[in-house]
Amino acid sequence: MTVSAEEIDVDRSQMKVSDDVAIQITDMNKWYGQFHVLRDINLTVNRGERIVIAGPSGSGKSTMIRCINRLEEHQSGSIVVNGVELTGDLKRIDEIRREVGMCFQHFNLFPHLTILENCTLAPIWVRKMPKREAEERAMHFLSRVKIPDQAHKYPGQLSGGQQQRVAIARSLCMNPQIMLFDEPTSALDPEMIKEVLDTMVDLAEEGMTMLCVTHEMGFARKVANRVIFMDRGQIVEQNEPEEFFNNPQNERTKLFLSQIMGH
Amino acid sequence: MTSSPHAPQSVAYVRTEDAPILPPPANTTGLYGWARRNFLDSMTDFSDVGSSVRSVLMILLTAFLLWFGISQIWGLIKFVFIDGIWSNPTGARREACLTQAQGGLLPNDQTVGACWPYVAANAKLFIYGRYPMAELWRPNLVFLLLALGLVWTLWSRMPYRKIGAALMLVVFPMVAFVLLTGADLSAPKAFWYVWPLATAILLGLGWAGGKGMGGEAVKAFSGAFWGLGLFFAYILVFALAATMNWGLNSVTTRDWGGLLVTLVVALTGITASLPLGILLALGRRSTLPAVKILSVAFIEFWRGVPLITVLFMSSVMLPLFLPPGTSFNDLLRALIGVTLFASAYMAEVVRGGLQAIPKGQTEGAQSLGLSFWETTRLIVLPQALTLVIPGIVNTFIGLFKDTTLVSIIGMFDLLGQVSSTFADSSWATPVTRPTGYLVVAAIFFVFCFLMSRYSMSMEKKLRRGHAR
């Protein structure tokens, strides 16, 4: 279910890619048991980049971005985030997770906490922020995703689109420098996809470094500065969106695009 | 979509006006509707042979259940109230509940029900056992504090419930211990050197780790050091309280009995088995092999042995392993046995809850930078424990009733204490046993029923947030 590019208004004036490296993945490999899920991944992400990662299911897109905040462990090669290398050291992992926000396909909001508590939990416990300040901050971001009036409800009382926007606000409360999106609109009804994409566009317009696994090709065209295509655990092709969509080089990319754009 | 008779029978159809909103048919609502749904429909259908047979069976079954239930309840009411012996003006003993033919005071044609003079005469024994009469204010004060504390912490409308809970968990056990025993214990001299030192070291390591000092190991385990250090400190304070001279006469636990023992064993077991069970459940899911193996071994061992065996072993076998001359309080042994036994069951109940929490919850918390313990405490456990409240309370209720087993190692809990009076010839009548057992059953029922109702109200309250 894709939203056509024409429906999204994008102001690209603030989207600037700097020379600073945010994420550096070098010769990274990962196995699930005997199965080689990620093969020879090399990727450099500069600050301010908006990268869309596309590919057929099972191609390792999600696994790759989950490696960036160590929800998945890689077995060889290196991943450096904000100048910190990811190893087994728990302190460093927590340090990176504080700076890298993530949104999931199924939102993963905490159902036993109110929307406001969902947003203030991490600032209070991880950043040791006073409760009042954390709540003001949470209300600020809830206003930005346009649901301040739901602050005292529980996640179960919100629609899917609202829940995903809360999840984005929850991540933003930690003031992350990088945002990872793992199929943020795949579990949503068509009428709710747009409200989540709009929020993501707002974020991009403010210059956030973003990595999005998504099938929203309209979003990729309008917002991304780079589209990466993965297949069978490898990065097969990457390019600027226009080139990527209009002039794909690899056979598998062509096949994928013809299937996804076919209707 | 079914088309109504007024709709045009074609593919194209446009509704021009809203269908009216109607109330439900009268015979589906209210008392009549309820009765119709629940019994009448299944009893009044005689349209064919099968339905008629079913209706007749339903009528017979309903009539039988009504007759059976009413006659049982009536029998109980008759035994307890109508035939029960309530007055004993002469202060007689067994004679008060025997007919003249049996050597008593009652007319020969009287049906004798519950013997309440027997209960009244033994009430103190049932509640306190052989606790010295002059000191009864002490258990009474403990009961009062317990009741007040429970109302404070368990009733959702009370203010400062967290403070109440902390007082109940930390201060109340000490107060109860001092009041009930008289606290004239003595600890070996070495304890006063070794224990404070160990406490200081643990707390020091916890503090240093938290401040980022010391090696990697100190940092990684600073939380564990804190936890263990606080536990040690608590034991130290407890030991200080237990060895101080409070000016109270000491009362040996051999003189405790009745409801007092039942409540002490049950409440200690309940409060200690939940945290222990949670730790064991987390341990069983740990990725550290040593922790996992220890937890599994502990749980399987205690679940694999009957409680009676545990109690027997604690009273008969444990002394064989202790150095000669050391004594170990009977009640304390039973407490430890019951607690460890219950915690193994609790661990499996909690593990069931932990398994029901989707992995996304942990990932969501981790992606925000919460540590393992923060994730466990703030995200996983609150949800997991809410899910398994019925199982937890089930274990509590089972534990409460299992306390009756301590009577086999020579301790007199409520049931044991009541049973002991059956041997008293001065109250030997045909109705003594039924009366005694009825009292025991009633008291146990009240406690278990209260626990059950409280758990249900808590489930309802906590489910609010999850409701969709």
Image: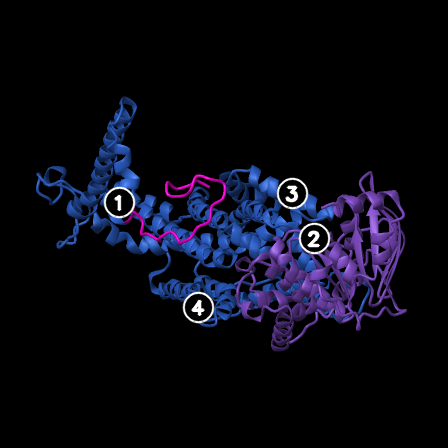
Chain colours: A purple, B blue
Badge 1 crowding class, 10 Å Cα cut-off, few under 14, some 14 to 19, many 20 or more, is few
> Quick check: marks 2 and 3 in contact, CB under 8 Å?
no
Mark 4–mark 1 distance (CA, rounded to whole Å) = 71 Å
User: SS at mark 4?
Assistant: loop
Q: Which of marks 4 and 1 is nearer the N terminus?
A: 1
Q: What residue type is labelled 2?
A: Thr
User: SS at mark 3?
Assistant: helix
Frontmost of labels 2 and 1 is 2
Q: What residue type is labelled 4?
A: Leu
Mark 4 sits on what residue?
A: B248
Mark 2 sits on what residue?
A: A2
Is A211 left, or right, of B428 in this rendering? right
> Quick check: marks 1 and 3 in contact, CB under 8 Å?
no
Badge 3 crowding class, 10 Å Cα cut-off, few under 14, some 14 to 19, many 20 or more, is some
Position of residue A27 measured from the top left corner of the image (x, y, whole percent): 91, 51
Label of residue B27 in the image: 1
> Quick check: marks 2 and 1 in contact, CB under 8 Å?
no
Q: Identify the magenta region.
A: B1-29
Residue at 61% in and 69% down: A146
Position of residue B204 measured from the top left corner of the image (x, y, whole percent): 72, 69
Mark 1–mark 3 distance (CA, rounded to whole Å) = 58 Å
**Magenta stretch mostly in which secondary structure?**
loop
